[in-house]
Image (cartoon, helix red, strand yellow):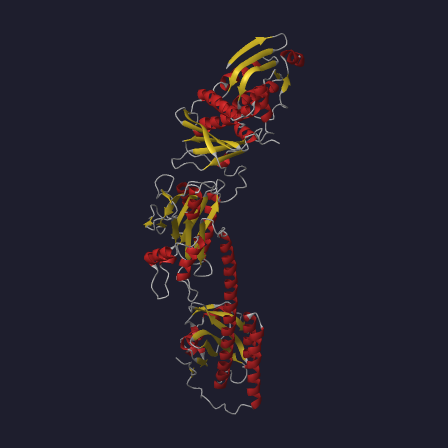
Amino acid sequence: MKHEIRDEKDATIVALEGDVDLQSSPDARKVLLECVGRKRPVLVDLSAVGYIDSSGVASLVESLQTAKRSGNTLVLVAVSEGAMRVLQLARLDKVFTICDTVEDGLKQVQ
Amino acid sequence: MGKRQSFSVSDASMPAGGEAGQAGQQVYDHLELLAAMGKDFASSGDIEASLKCAVEHITEYLDAEGGALFLLDDKGETLRCHACVGPTEITGLTLKCDQGIVGRCVQNEIGEIVRNVTKDAGFHAGIDEQTGYTTRSILCAPMSVKDERIGAIELINKRGGDGLFEESDLHLLQAMSASAALAIHNARQAEALVEQERIARELELAAEIQRSLLPEAGADDFPVAGVNHAARTVSGDFYDFFPLDDGRICFTLGDVSGKGMNAALMMAKTASLYRCLGKTVRQPGRLMARINAEICETTTRGMFVTMVGGIYDPSTGIVRFANAGHEPPLFHDAEGDFHALPAEAPPLGISPTLVDGLEFPETELKLDGGVLYIFTDGVTEGYLEDGRELKVGGLKRLIRENAALNVKGKLNAVIDCVDRGDAALRDDLTLLAIDDAVPLDLRTSGKTVAVEKTPQDPIAAAEEEEILLSLTVPSQADLLKLIRNAVSETARFCGCDKDVCRDIVIAVDEACQNVIRHAYGGSPNGEIGLEIIRRSDALVFLLRDFAESIDVSSVKPRDLDDIKPGGLGTHFMREVMDDVQFMPPPAAGGNLLRMIKKLPKGPDNET
């Protein structure tokens, strides 16, 4: 799994790429929590995530909870088909704010 | 020994006899009193109240200041006052069985007139000292029926006249005592009879519950059958068999030491434990160890259970069982030879630590058309018509002679020889047989051996199976991608569309993760075996590990309302697959998970 973090005017955008599975989810968790810790809205770009498993989903949930606790927001953007299926299976598609594109996400957090 | 009718008068100054001229009226009163007392005892359900009433009548009739009725206890060691009238209340007072004049009277079974108690060494002055009452004279008559001593009636201080009891008083008291004794005896017998009937009813109820613990007989071609004849109402033996959801049959037969109600209760406990645990613990050795631990924890000292428990697979003819100190089962193979299979472990309930490790040793046996007989010693030690014991030799003979019958017929042939219904059984008879003949025929003719439709299993035994993929990889997280790709390709190969492929990958990936994280605790040194089997209508995924067996009941899908990280994997598996089940693993141990995904119908099937 690879990742890329860039800071926009209104949010930190973190893009994950590849498979977020048992092997890589500890890295994903570290990256996500680090972004949430910046006290700015976080957009998680999942467009390039081919596969995400329960441990990856758990990292997302933990990051969302951490953000909410500190009054911060975390939005999932451009969720790939594979990742969306897993979120649906976990019934988390209603828990996360999900936007189709990065632009929509930025509007959401303004 | 006949009943002694003699009596003694302890004070020589009193002339005996001379009362022959009693008025006829007195005799009439006396008879009437006896009749009234007898009626009272017979009609009253309360023996203590009747005794009190009798003592009152007698005391009044013989014009004494006080009267008391003493009864011997069950052991004949103490005399207890059950009823009393007069100036001092001594109901409940106990004396040693030979203490005082009443004690002497009971022991000698001789009635006495003691005109001056101060001259009698046997007089027990303790009561007078306690009550302040002065006893001058005593009239005492024993109560007994046949050779059974029951007690005595004692009267104190004659009112009126010279204050002395007459010999005629003693005659009268003896007659009334005899009448009271008979009444007490009868009342006690009636009470015992009622109690016996109550116990018999309770036993019959217990026996009914026990019978309900035995399994219902299967169809005539069901390969396992059992029979149990109790020597008494309740039995210390048991047997059970029930099909597992994968078509295998779990069976057991056991014998609790002893034959009474305690053995019956122990039987109920052991049989229930087996039926309950046997549905989840599917390794006989491990199952027996669990039951042993449970029994040891709560057993009554000195009780134990010998037991055989195992699993029979009709689709292969293989039986795997553990034997805890039970009679060696007999295997009658298809060639007609017998093999005894002796126990390799002690009975259950002896010690939780007698068996090395966590399991009882298992025996594996391929029946190959043969029959396995498991039985209690009540069968081999049962008496034949000529009075000889059946013994193992006789059992073998009966088995051989009736080999052509179906499994129920085989069992009945043996039981009928030992329990002919003409005499009480020496011991409980219990016999269980696993007959592989019918399943073997089905196997060799290529037919499916379907023992029982399995309601939990959405896809019952399919006809054709094809192994598509079989791989074994180390339990490393970085190899999961490899497994995902292999699974995805296999699913695609079977015609699954993109979404179904993705779902299957999720379920298998999560199952593998569980193995790595939970079964192996994150260690990369374990092995994961994955097999994908194609059936006509489904894909079957078998995931095997070689770790400690996990407690299946602890593997639950998470509660989705509870949003927190972790614990989702099992939910994904159940959500995606049509069936997810932990299976009994092969003898080598570990865990086996089976997931089934129904295949979409091909274009040929769609109309």
**Whole-percent x, y for residue A1 in the image:** 50, 15
Q: Is residue B304 visible?
A: no
Q: Is residue B132 above or below residue A60?
A: below
Residue placed most toward the observer, B153 or B349: B349
Q: Is residue B588 above or below residue B524?
A: below
- Would you identify the image quadrant in which residue B357 lies? top left
Residue extending furthest toward the bottom = B21
Residue placed most toward the observer, B202 or B130: B202
Question: Residue at (50%, 62%) from the top-left corner?
Answer: B199
Question: Residue at (40%, 60%) from the top-left corner?
Answer: B427
In which quadrant is the C terminus of chain B drawn?
Answer: top right
**Whole-percent x, y for residue B573 in the image:** 53, 29
**Whole-percent x, y for residue B102 in the image:** 45, 75
**Whole-percent x, y for residue B432 in the image:** 42, 52
Residue B242 vs residue A109: left or right? Answer: left
Residue B507 vs residue B384: left or right? Answer: right
Residue placed most toward the observer, B402 or A67: B402
Total tally of numbered discs in the picture: 0
In which quadrant is the N terminus of chain B drawn?
Answer: bottom left
Q: Is residue A25 above or below residue B375?
A: above
Q: Is residue B488 visible?
A: yes
- Would you identify the image quadrant in which residue B561 lies? top right
